[in-house]
Image (cartoon, helix red, strand yellow):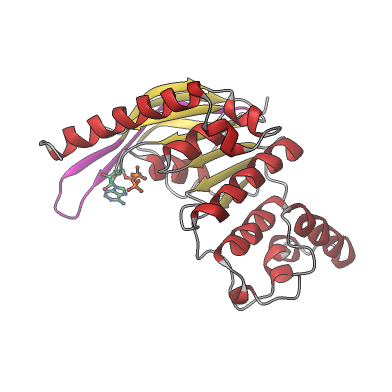
Amino acid sequence: MSDLISQNLNMIFKTPKGETVHALKDVNFTLKRGELLTVLGPSGCGKTTLLNITAGFIRPTSGNITLNNNEIDGPGVERGMVFQQGALFEWLTVAENVNFGLRMKKEDPIKTAKKVDEWLDIVGLQGFGNTPTYQLSGGMQQRVALARCLINDPDLILMDEPLGALDALTREKMQSLVLKIWKETGKTIILITHSVEEALLLGERLYVMAPRPGRIHKEYNLPFASMGLKQDLREIKKNKDFSSKREEILEMIWNMEEEIMGKDI
Ligand SMILES: Nc1ncnc2c1ncn2[C@@H]1O[C@H](COP(=O)(O)OP(=O)(O)OP(=O)(O)O)[C@@H](O)[C@H]1O
């Protein structure tokens, strides 16, 4: 079984002032192999905490999370991360960034070079292998980050706002790339975003989380990611069902934020 299973996950932080923050309360879900889950919610609802526990960076206060029946108790090669930005080695070339994991594992250099070429091709960076990473645009850097993660063939890919720092047009292109990679690799993906449109477009499943305590508030099963494999994403945004879900979720998050603020905004 290659499912990711979260059972009664709770995370309680203590702040330096001695206050407790219930960042996650009784989070239960099963993600099947090959599913693409997007997670959305107002600031502080526990999205990054959930991802950090799944990555094995932090341990939950109670409950557990398993991947392929193995409890996650630390970082592991079967889980790959893609962050918003800044996680590349800027002084290395594109190829040196992408092959980093395989070099650490002392894989055969010829096979590794072939794999690097294949992945640069998939992410649209053919011919950029020798380019220093600092010379790349933000969108190109995120393509490198995707290739660097995928070349290690993880079972689960965790993405924390991977497209959040990009301009609108580049972001749209990268959304199509994420869908293409999902289709071509069949990987299980969890993607956190602050964008309602992005969560709807990319998630075949979508969790809207609520804060205080952080929890799964509502789950959607959506057709748009599958549609996006065949159709222009802009066309999908014109879909009536898409618009009504967008409005519904925007209002849901707006209401949560009003509640947090304790007043009209
Ligand atoms: N190490 C920590 N110590 C104390 N409190 C923490 C810690 N990490 C997170 N928190 C708190 O836990 C709650 C959830 O934080 P988290 O970063 O997971 O939310 P988020 O939904 O990812 O927010 P954002 O969208 O702003 O990134 C917040 O109230 C946050 O302040």
Prevalent SS, magenta region: strand
Q: Is residue 15 above or below residue 12?
A: below
* Quadrant the N terminus occupies: top right
Judge left or right: residue 250 versus residue 37: left
Is 261 inside the magenta-drawn segment? no
The percent position of residue 88, horizontal first and vertical second, equals 58, 66
Give the image location of residue 109, x and y in percent. Answer: 85, 67
Which residue is drawn at the image coordinates 30% and 27% (left, top)?
252
Q: Nearer the viewer, residue 53 or 253?
A: 253
Task: Check residue 17 for magenta coloring.
Answer: yes
- Does the rendering let one see residue 61? yes
- The residue under the point 75% across, 66% down is 103
Identify which residue is drawn at 34% across, 29% down. Answer: 215
Q: Is residue 171 left or right of residue 183?
A: left
The magenta segment is 3-23
Q: Nearer the viewer, residue 41 or 14?
A: 41
Q: Is residue 250 above or below residue 43?
A: above
Residue at horizontal 60%, vertical 38%? Answer: 233
The C terminus - image quarter: top left
For the image, the number of numbered tags is: 0
Considering every residue shown, the one lying at the far left of the view is: 263
